[in-house]
Image (cartoon, rainbow, N blue to C red):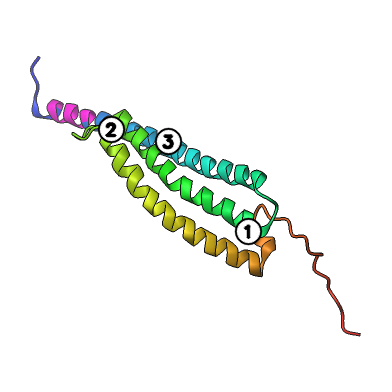
Amino acid sequence: MKLNLITSFTLVENHKISMNLCLTCLRLSNTLFSRIVKSSYLSVSFAIFHLFKRILPKTKISLIAAAGIAALISVPAAAAGFVVQYAIGATAPFSVSSVLAAMVGTHILIGIGESIITIFAVGAILSSRSDLVYGYRSQRSSLEVRTAE
């Protein structure tokens, strides 16, 4: 088979198109998998929040504690989700166990910070506008509108 310059250029261009198509499909599948992992760690934190909300007494402090615990656990859960992705497609020379220890260990510290921030934020919102916080049903009467007489 004799190839001239135009034919070889066409083959190279077709190869580039097919390579770009393969890379695009790979990126889409990676993005889809990342979104599944991210939504699963959000589901973990939501489930933990509801679990502690049911276990603890029905007070404002219990709701704040449930939100803080869920925030603490959600960050290492996200790190564990990354480790799952790393284990599936690891091309780096690090072992999965060392990546797991590094990621989860670091993200526990980050989770403590996020938990503290969540506790203060939810506490402040509950004290000023408790109707804005999901999961809290106020024991107070509803807002009464009065007109000037």
Q: Position of residue 127 (x, y in %)?
A: 64, 68
Q: State how far apart marks 1 and 3 are (Cα).
A: 38 Å
Could you tell me if residue 112 is visible in this image?
yes
- Above or below, 124 against 41 in this view is below
Q: Position of residue 8 (x, y in %)?
A: 13, 27
Image quarter of residue 27:
top left
Name the residue rendered at 40%, 38% in the picture: 81
Question: Which residue lies under the disc numbered 3?
Answer: 32
Closer-to-camera residue (85/10) = 85
Name the residue rendered at 43%, 54% in the picture: 112
Q: Give the main secondary structure, helix, strand or loop, of the magenta stretch.
A: helix
* Mark with earlier residue (2, 1): 1
Q: Tell me the tag on residue 110.
A: none
Do tag 2 and tag 1 residues touch (Cβ < 8 Å)?
no
Query: Which is in the foreground here, disc 1 or disc 3?
Result: 1
Q: Amino acid at mark 1?
A: Ile
Question: Which residue lies under the disc numbered 1?
Answer: 61
- Above or below, 23 against 2 in this view is below
How many badges with numbers are in the image?
3
Could you tell me if residue 22 is visible in this image?
no
- Farthest residue to the bottom: give it: 149
Do tag 3 and tag 2 residues touch (Cβ < 8 Å)?
no
Task: Locate residue 136 relative to residue 19 in the image: left or right.
Answer: right
Image quarter of residue 38:
top left
Q: Tell me the tag on residue 96.
A: 2
- Farthest residue to the right: give it: 149
In the rendered structure, does residue 115 fall within the stretch colored magenta?
A: no
How crowded is the residue under tag 2: few (<14 C-alpha within 10 Å), some, or many (20+)?
some
How crowded is the residue under tag 3: few (<14 C-alpha within 10 Å), some, or many (20+)?
few
Task: Locate residue 100 relative to residue 64 in the image: left or right.
Answer: left
